[in-house]
Image: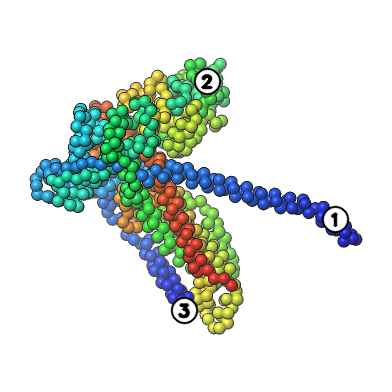
Amino acid sequence: MRTAAETQERVRAGLSRRYRAERRFRAYGMAAIAVGIAFVLFLFGTVFAQGLSALRQAYVQIDVFYDPEIIDPAGNRDPDDLVVADYQSLVRASLRERFPTVEGRPALRELYGIASSAASVELQRRVTADPGLIGQRERLWVLADDTVDMFLKGKVSRSAPEEERRLSDTQLGQIDALKSQNALKLRFNSAFFSNGDSRDPEQAGVRGAVVGSFLTLLITLLLSFPIGVGAAVYLEEFAPRNRITDLIEVNINNLAAVPSIVFGLLGLAMFISFFGLPRSAPLVGGLVLTLLTLPTIIIASRAALKAVPPSIREAALGIGASRWQTVVHHVLPLAMPGVLTGAIIGMARALGESAPLLMIGMVAFIVEVPAGVLDPSTVLPVQVFLWSDLPERGFVERTSGAIIVLLLFLIVMNAAAVVLRSKFEKRW
Amino acid sequence: MSQSIRARIFATVAASAAIVAALSPVAPAQSARDFINVVGSSTVYPFTTTVAEKFGRQGRFKTPKVESTGTGGGIKLFCNGVGPQHADVVNASRRMNASEFDTCRKNGVRDILEVRVGYDGLTLSESKRGPVMNLTRKQVYLALAKQVPDPANPTTLIANPYTSWNQIDKSLPATKIEVLGPPPTSGTRDSFNELYMEAGCRTYPWLNTLRGQDEKRFKRLCHTLREDGAFVEAGENDNLIVQKIEANRNAVGIFGFSFLEENMDKLRGSKIDGVEPTYETIASGKFPASRPLFIYVKKAHIGVIPGLQEFVNEYVSDKALGEEGYLSDRGLVAQPKSDLARTRADVKSLKNFAP
């Protein structure tokens, strides 16, 4: 038997050691968080440092004369003629007007290289929208070529020897002249948000990928949310506990850990080869991502249903509600915040997924913005993947720009999760 | 009250989604397609997409869809059969081989048009700030093979002993051997093995004779790269290799000519067998490591898929493939005039491909 004093002595002796242990443990935790934050900051820092310049784009101002001789030599304003006319030569003529001293084919080629080939498309669009422009003069801003863009953003050094730059000394002189006339400057890059993919960095935009991601996720949500919640409700509230349901549960947990590329292969074999659905379509992408997110949603929904206190069920049953009424009127609404969180986490994972979509052909060059779930399309992460592998330097910043858009998309989704949860949250 | 409404909404959503789920698999198989479907090599992808975009902008047909699947995967998709659910064109960074052609024929894809679109120079490049490299393919082989012939007794192989370039040859700089290149899954790696490693290997007579006798062993000896850090697999992404070389002035990178051309202010192409990689040396065939690029067109789809013939015509037009065409701006090395004329004649007569 120890006396009280002895016990106290022993406790006191160990006390400082225990305090130290606790302080150490807290320090470990703080270090872990600090390392995590450092990595996130580094990632965001590099992405934003490289990608923010994608929000601005060099535009050049041209005085264009809509020459009726070139656009519509027949003079009958036939819409088909207006579409195929040589608008490139109008852009070239206006550049020649600005630099009348430039002569000779190689020198002219360099001069023409200042404006993007998108300029002629812009003119075509304007003329077909309003044929009244023909014969008029107009001053407008058109996209500059990506090499000019890179130069204005300081990504091509002026001090490098001429043969190692993509811009010659004469071109630099022309760029300086345009700048001093205020006819060449960086403006907000609206093309980045309104265009689909393009092989010219200055014309490439994320709209096609954003719409593709949206359509794919819509299909995923429409399928995986009801199926997932239905499966969870049945398994949690109605199913008997026996070998079969145990087996199902184990399988669902296993499926959640299957590498996503496997779902891609499954989708390729099932939906494309067997059912004959088109390759590269958001419908197939959505179906594959449904397979991927279902286990996540089922597991999260079951956990949320389990967390509803049994007293709620007993009370409902006690006043004569059927089991179906109990679940639909009371248990499910109370479990909704958890269910929604699970669904949105699943959706966020689906949004960032690219591997299974490679298998079903969504890694493709698609210029047109998809209009429906059967049109060929790509998604944001795949667009990032595609751009990162192109040689043109303008695509480096656009890759990071697309990552920023993807991050914003994710932040909006997660914010929606927080809002929904706080709206439905019940405390007791 | 509000809960029961919510429940009813939920039930409706669930029911409608179930209907979507039930209906979607029986949606009709693609009966017709109004756009061209291209699959295949990621090396040819930047060029075919350029043509596809220009072609689409003309407004007569929809912009073709170009998938980047790799040459092997693309040919598999292409050879799967005839019909709108199968690809019309495949990009290839090498020629279609006999066994692939057999698979094609077995699946009913009998008539194929081969179009040679140009060349790609496979370069070794170094940072502008680093030492100048003047390599031979034999030196590249000695620097990178896992096993190399013993200098004392060239008919036996030893584990690669070289750690710096000047150990291989006095004329080379005294820097550590560090080469960044693509992983084995890449078509570029296949080309590297063929154009550099095999060529270097075959400078040893006994290895050259082995090639005829035991091809498997020859490939194993010549294609196996070092795993001790001198060769670094830098991933499929060529831009990443460019960035790494920029950061490390002693490293050498392996990638296609278009990446070198785009980054001339930071990189310098190493001379190979005394020849610098430039547009001219690759086009004329002087640069020893250049490979032809192809597209293959399914003839049964011409006239069925709208615009296919016109797309191929656009691809071989002067605007695209000529010496000043828009593809040369993208770094594709055009073929000499006489070859281009032959390619055009083949396209015109829709000549049948046979490996």
Nearest the eye: B93 or B260: B260
Q: Are marks 1 and 2 in contact (CB under 8 Å)?
A: no
Rendering coords of residue A68 (x, y %):
12, 44
Whether residue A310 is situated above or below residue A19 in the rendered picture: below
Tell me which residue sits at (45%, 37%) in the image: B240
Q: Which residue is mark 2?
A: B174
Q: Are marks 2 and 3 on the same chain?
A: yes
Rendering coords of residue A163 (x, y %):
34, 26
Q: Residues within 10 Å of mark 3 (few under 14, many from 20)?
A: few
Q: Is residue B341 visible?
A: no
Q: Which residue is mark 3?
A: B1
Spatial separation of the CA atoms under disc 1 and disc 2 = 69 Å
Residue placed farthest to the bottom in the image? A319
Horizontally, is B204 left or right of A313 in the view?
left
Helix, strand or loop at mark 3: loop
Horizontally, is A415 left or right of A249 in the view?
left
Amino acid on which disc 1 is placed: Glu
Spatial separation of the CA atoms under disc 2 and disc 3 = 83 Å
